[in-house]
Amino acid sequence: MSATPIQAAVLREFGQPLVVERLELDPPKAGEVQVRMAASGVCHSDLHVVEGVHPTSLPVVLGHEGAGVVERLGDGVSGLAPGDHVLLTWLPYCGHCRACTSGWPNRCENTAWYDATLEDGTCRFHQDGAPIHHYNTSSFAERSVVPARTAIRVDRSLPLTELALMGCAVMTGVGAALNTARVRPGDRVAVVGCGGVGLNVVQGARIAGASTIVAVDVIPEKLELARELGATHALDASVGDAAQAVRELVPGGVDHAFEALGRIDTIESAVAMTGRGGQAVLIGMASPDARVALDALTMTLQERCVRGSWYGSCVPLRDIPMLVELYRDGRLRLDPLITTCTLHDVNEAFSRMRSGHTARSVIVY
């Protein structure tokens, strides 16, 4: 099979805009599939790469929150066929390491091919013979090649523009509430940062039956959207001490405080919101040098804890079908989160993200 000409948004230098360029996409190899993208979310993790906070090899095609249609199969691929609609997860776990066999594929010990290539250490994107690197699913491209086990078939009747968000933001947020924190009916929750991930924590807490959900942000529109999606209280963090305000709303503190920004000040605030036996769940991607102060004695005496949540502690083959069913029956809402754009608008989407006035930009192909 010959290479396919495509358009993709390429990052060539940290701190610079992405450029939509003409590339060639090699056919899928064994265990891989080629997917024609229908939609791709624009995630803050992509922005972290653009800004050099979490660098990767350059040049690179970013994007990791995609959905599309299978076009080609590599050797040995079963369970998928050309024409299948698929949601892409960026978690190509090996299935045989200690973490995977213990039921934690999100902690897989053998995903070293994440270093800007596919599993065999090579790239499928090229330009004039020079390799262009991958970033997980590389969904900022008209077409991409991904490991077959990361392409999960979905009902063709469902809109891929909305399902694309399940590949990252929805799974990360809802999974943090249901899988990592294990929110139970009647629990009290605070969510610090109400972007695409934080708003899905709100939804996950509501689905789990939390009695109190305090949304914390500085953007009024996001607080309004949090209320629409299930928050019982909306708190403007630009006015006063957010942790104190939460503890006034919830005497004794919350059972679960989710931090979805990755900032030192908001992490420390989230910890301070928790009460006896409570937990602060860190979801936001902090910079590598971030260090947080902790009142160790209080954590011990009150049995409070801080824990991380990576990709919603998910098992993709179990949890993505669950999310699809929650979406199908109306318990999980995605349409209010979405602002659509084209691939050529990707830099504008990053600008909107920096301003904080959109929940999720979605590129529609």
Image (cartoon, rainbow, N blue to C red):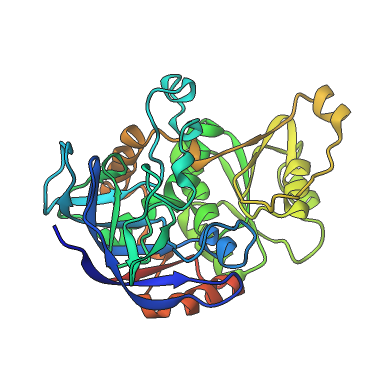
- Residue 50 location (% of width, % of height): 56, 67
- Residue 33 location (% of width, % of height): 22, 49
Give the tally of numbered discs: 0
Quadrant placement of the C terminus: bottom left
Q: Residue at x 54, y 40 (%)?
A: 310
Q: Residue furthest front?
A: 129
**37 sits left or right of 77 in the view:** right
Asked which quadrant contains residue 125, the reply is bottom left
Please name whichever residue, 2 or 249, is drawn nearer the observer in this view of the structure. 2
- Residue 240 location (% of width, % of height): 81, 62
**6 sits left or right of 286 in the view:** left
Please name whichever residue, 157 or 75, is drawn nearer the observer in this view of the structure. 75
Q: Residue at x 33, y 32 (%)?
A: 318
Please name whichever residue, 122 or 5, is drawn nearer the observer in this view of the structure. 122
**201 sits left or right of 37 in the view:** right
Q: Is residue 205 visible?
A: yes
Please name whichever residue, 216 or 28, is drawn nearer the observer in this view of the structure. 28
Whether 285 is drawn above or below 320: the answer is below
- Residue 225 location (% of width, % of height): 50, 63
Quadrant placement of the N terminus: bottom left
Q: Is residue 209 visible?
A: no
Q: Residue at x 43, y 71 (%)?
A: 10
